[in-house]
Amino acid sequence: MLLSRGLSVLRTTKLLRGAPLETVQQVRNSSHVWSYRSAGPPPTKNLLWAAEAVQGFAWWWVLWHLYTEPGHVTGEFPYPDPRQWSDEELGIPSS
């Protein structure tokens, strides 16, 4: 901790003296095209096919489970009829 604070103090004193700082440009080793305020590169055919396959599998999974196990969405037990509830069950005080 002391070392990191000492380095920042040295940098600050260098700034206060007015000495120019050495700037080091880092090398970007990215594997894609960088675009700023413009459209990115179009996706490849393989990427489009893979996206369609994953999307198709996801929809198949959802629809198959809705068909075979509808209780997960609609509930496993019948919904009670609220007209049969008494005022006491609903929390309505008797007058």
Image (cartoon, helix red, strand yellow):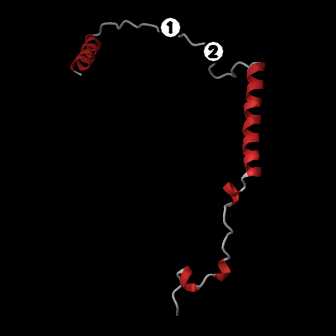
Residue farthest bottom in this picture: 95
Residue positioned 64% across, 23% down in the render: 37
87 over 5 or under it: above or below: below
Label 2's element? loop
Instruction: Give the amino acid at mark 2.
Output: His
Q: In this view, does 23 lie to the left or right of 72?
A: left
91 over 17 or under it: above or below: below
- Name the foreground residue: 21 vs 57: 57
At which x and y percent is residue 49? 78, 25
Residue positioned 24% across, 13% down in the render: 10
Q: Name the residue under label 2.
A: 32
The Cα atoms of the two marked residues, 1 and 2, are separated by: 14 Å
At which x and y percent is residue 72? 67, 55
At which x and y percent is residue 86? 59, 85
Sequence-wise, which precedes: disc 1 or disc 2?
1
56 over 88 or under it: above or below: above
Quadrant (top left/top right/bottom left/bottom right) for the N terminus: top left
Q: How many residues crowd mark 2 within 10 Å: few (<14), some (14–19), many (20+)?
A: few
Q: Name the residue under label 1.
A: 27
On residue 44, the disc is none
Residue farthest front in this picture: 68
